[in-house]
Image (tube, rainbow, N blue to C red):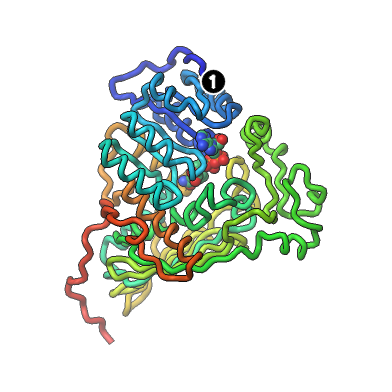
């Protein structure tokens, strides 16, 4: 499918970059609106592509609503034709995870820079192909780790950079998803490892990137355990259902199920998914208890870094609240940081389950002396204000220099997914997995200088 553009409503300037987007589900909207509304002076959207032609059309209508020129739409099979006809400078990849590498590689081969949603990809071989292509073509590859831009997490980076707690020797990091947001991963393509790499890649890529970046360290070795024990047919039966069924829409027990999702009740979910099922059979409301799910719902991972630091991490997807606690144990003290997050189902404008109280707390506790509570940095918007800041970093022609180095490239994308890929391998073998055995020659990201532990340490008082 292809349709010609309508006349531009904003005059092109020399600095306006041409963008194409492939993968037109809920996440792509951030980038489409970023280009067509907030940053319209700096860029224009010239092509839209998806495997589902219904969602291509919805995205084109979105351009019209944004008051922007309506870009031509293309089927996934016509991706290369889109590049040839629309000549984007940059291709933004927001497809399901396992397809990222294919578009990144073909776009870079065609001379485009690329921006990809996390995770950069889902396994070591695809990662190697992306890194090789980037090196060979010399194009830029950016990975949008929006979590880094969340003000309280940037503040943790600032505290660690200040040296107040000295060298970080270990980290305890526990991430909780509740049964609104957590369950959502079990409804859709994420619920199968071949699409998402499982949550240790799909979701934990955010968390492993945060630790890599916070510590300025390279992951070296990984041990993992994981299981699926909540989102199972047995749990459905223990909750009094006769069993898992295919999907919520046709479920004979929908009235009794606390995990029922009504696609038709949300205008966004209806337009984006329910109304487009006819094109590809993608059901956004599959039963969270069905048998063919093959991802874990409970995961524990230990990581060793080249600085000597260690990480003890867990991800739990059926919790009573949503958010995380992280603690950094340093040679001069400890930082404890907790965020209780709002809960939502991706793709809706609504917040389900109310906004939990608790908010953000950050505390610095020296080895001796009084702890101090830190007033958290804050901002307004999605992902704690992080998404807006990230878009400025992406779309402004001359973003201000960032001492936290939050703009991530393929090196950071690789370092974060390889922790999850190694954890997946560890789940199969039970062994400690060396990242270098799966993907030799990872290049150090900009945030990770060669490690040293040689600065003099003050002797603590008694
Ligand atoms: N950074 C974040 O906080 C964040 C939040 C949500 C999603 N994401 C990422 O964004 C990406 C998209 O997620 P989403 O929630 O929008 O999913 P989605 O299911 O809503 O949308 C995915 C889109 O990709 C299309 N697609 C799938 N396979 C394709 C292929 N081979 N070729 C072309 N199009 C294809 C689908 O038709 C769909 O339109 C994922 O990589 C996800 O990890 C990131």
Residue drawn at 55 percent across, 32 percent down: 51
| Percent position of residue 176, x then y | 54, 61
Residue 104 locus on image (x, y percent): 39, 37
Give left or right: position of 171 versus 193: left
* Residue nearer the viewer, 374 or 429: 429
Residue at horizontal 38 percent and vertical 21 percent from the top: 84
Which percent across, then down, holds residue 433?
40, 66
Q: Can you see residue 29?
A: no
User: Where in the figure is residue 451, as x and y percent of width and height?
Assistant: 23, 64
Which quadrant holds residue 460?
bottom left
Residue 212 sits above or below residue 284 on the image: below
Point 58% across, 51% down: residue = 192
Residue under numbered circle 1? 1
Q: Quadrant of residue 321?
A: bottom right
Report the quarter where the N terminus lies: top right
In the image, 131 versus 162, the foreground residue is 131
Q: Is residue 396 visible?
A: yes
């Amino acid at each position: 499918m292809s349709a010609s553009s309508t006349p531009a409503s904003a005059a092109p300037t020399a600095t306006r970059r041409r963008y194409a987007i492939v993968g037109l589900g809920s996440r792509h909207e951030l980038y489409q609106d970023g280009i067509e509304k907030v940053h319209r002076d700096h860029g224009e959207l010239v092509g839209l592509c998806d495997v589902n032609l219904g969602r291509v059309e919805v995205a084109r209508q979105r351009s019209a609503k944004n008051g922007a020129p309506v870009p031509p739409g293309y089927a996934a099979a016509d991706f290369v034709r889109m590049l040839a006809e629309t000549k984007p400078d940059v291709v933004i990849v927001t497809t399901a995870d396992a397809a990222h590498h294919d578009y990144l590689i073909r776009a870079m081969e065609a001379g485009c820079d690329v921006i990809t949603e996390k995770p950069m990809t889902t396994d070591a071989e695809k990662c190697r192909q992306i890194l090789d292509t980037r090196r060979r073509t010399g194009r830029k590859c950016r990975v949008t780790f929006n979590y880094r831009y969340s003000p309280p997490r940037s503040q943790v980076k600032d505290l660690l950079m200040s040296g107040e707690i000295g060298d970080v020797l270990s980290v305890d990091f526990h991430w909780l998803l509740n049964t609104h947001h957590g369950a959502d991963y079990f409804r859709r393509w994420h619920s199968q490892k071949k699409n998402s790499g499982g949550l240790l890649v799909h979701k934990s890529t955010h968390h492993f990137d945060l630790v890599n970046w916070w510590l300025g360290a390279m992951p070296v070795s990984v041990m993992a355990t994981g299981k699926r024990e909540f989102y199972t047919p047995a749990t459905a039966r223990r909750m009094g259902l006769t069993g898992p069924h295919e999907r919520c829409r046709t479920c004979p027990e929908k009235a009794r199920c606390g995990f029922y999702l009504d696609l038709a009740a949300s205008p966004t979910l209806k337009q984006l998914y329910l109304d487009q099922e006819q094109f590809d059979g993608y059901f956004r409301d599959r039963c969270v208890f069905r048998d063919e799910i093959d991802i874990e719902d409970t995961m524990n991972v230990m990581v060793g870094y080249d600085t000597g630091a260690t990480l003890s991490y867990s991800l739990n997807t059926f919790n009573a609240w949503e958010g995380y606690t992280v603690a950094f144990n340093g040679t001069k003290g400890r930082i404890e940081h907790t965020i209780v997050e709002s809960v939502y189902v991706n793709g809706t404008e609504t917040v389900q389950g109310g906004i939990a109280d608790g908010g953000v707390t950050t505390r610095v506790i020296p080895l001796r002396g009084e702890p101090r509570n830190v007033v958290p940095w804050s901002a307004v918007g999605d992902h704690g204000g992080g998404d807006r800041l990230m878009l400025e970093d992406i779309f402004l022609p001359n973003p201000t220099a960032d001492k936290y180095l939050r703009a991530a490239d393929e090196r950071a994308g690789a370092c974060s997914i390889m922790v999850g890929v190694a954890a997946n391998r560890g789940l199969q073998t039970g062994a400690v997995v060396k990242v270098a055995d799966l993907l030799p020659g990872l290049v150090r990201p900009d945030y990770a200088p060669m490690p040293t532990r040689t600065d003099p340490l003050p002797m603590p008082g008694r």
